[in-house]
Amino acid sequence: MVVYDNVVLIGFMGSGKTSVGKVLARHLCKTFVDVDTVIEKEQNCSVSEIFADKGEEYFRSLEQKCINELTQNKGQVIATGGGLPIYSEISKKSLIIYIDADFDVILGRLPAKERAKRPLLHDESRAKGLFKERIGRYEELANFRVDANQSIPTFIHVALDYVLDQRVL
Ligand SMILES: Nc1ncnc2c1ncn2[C@@H]1O[C@H](COP(=O)(O)OP(=O)(O)O)[C@@H](O)[C@H]1O
Ligand SMILES: O=C(O)C1=C[C@@H](OP(=O)(O)O)[C@@H](O)[C@H](O)C1
């Protein structure tokens, strides 16, 4: 049986990776880490500011460096940004869970303040295009997909049961 170092959550912007990750980590008694938050702390500015000042390509290089460093450690639940698995390699020793919510559900959940934090969500039709483009990659990479269209308490046990059936350090 494969032994995984970490649980890594992937999925589109706003699908709930951070929210689900925190709950999952608590139940599993693992450390929760959010890639965007780590980058923001290291750079001492927000993701939006990095996009505006240094550009998306630079942000993608920070993501790759960050996920490489984080996956040197073990026993964590790691929430990624929606574009990370599109542009970065994720260690093969990661148990990858796809947090899958419909585009309209995501938009309905995000207040203006949350949308403003995500530069690639500002233009709705472009964001919908990205959503369609990325689904295939998320599905291909994931060990497991969780339907995240409902409230977290209604589906968290599905993710938890799956992880508990695997061997994660
Ligand atoms: N299953 C859910 N039901 C209702 N609201 C949710 C759910 N998952 C996330 N949210 C809300 O959606 C927003 C985006 O969630 P977040 O966890 O930040 O997504 P991500 O990390 O994937 O970008 C937050 O305001 C969060 O409270
Ligand atoms: O999908 C993307 O390309 C992005 C997703 C964001 O993270 P969330 O998925 O947490 O919103 C953040 O990394 C950045 O705005 C780019």
Image: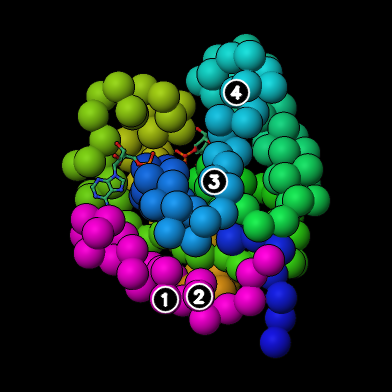
How many other residues sit within 10 Å of disc 1, few (<14), some (14-19) or many (≥20)?
few
Q: Do the residues labelled 3 and 1 touch (CB within 8 Å)?
A: no
Q: Which residue, given by chain and number where applicable, does mark 1 sit on?
A: 161
Q: Are marks 1 and 2 in contact (CB under 8 Å)?
A: yes
Height in image: 37 above or below 95? above
Determine the CA span between mark 3 and mark 4. Answer: 16 Å
**For the residue marked with disc 4, what is the amino acid?**
Glu
Name which of mark 3 and mark 1 comes first in the sequence. 3
Q: Position of residue 55 (x, y in %)?
A: 64, 22
Q: Which residue, given by chain and number where applicable, does mark 4 sit on?
A: 40
Height in image: 138 above or below 11? below
Q: Is mark 2 on a helix, strand or loop?
A: helix
**For the residue marked with disc 1, what is the amino acid?**
Asp
- Residue drawn at 59 percent across, 61 percent down: 7
The part of the chain drawn in magenta is 145-169
Determine the CA span between mark 3 and mark 1. Answer: 18 Å
**For the residue marked with disc 3, what is the amino acid?**
Phe
- Residue drawn at 74 percent across, 67 percent down: 92
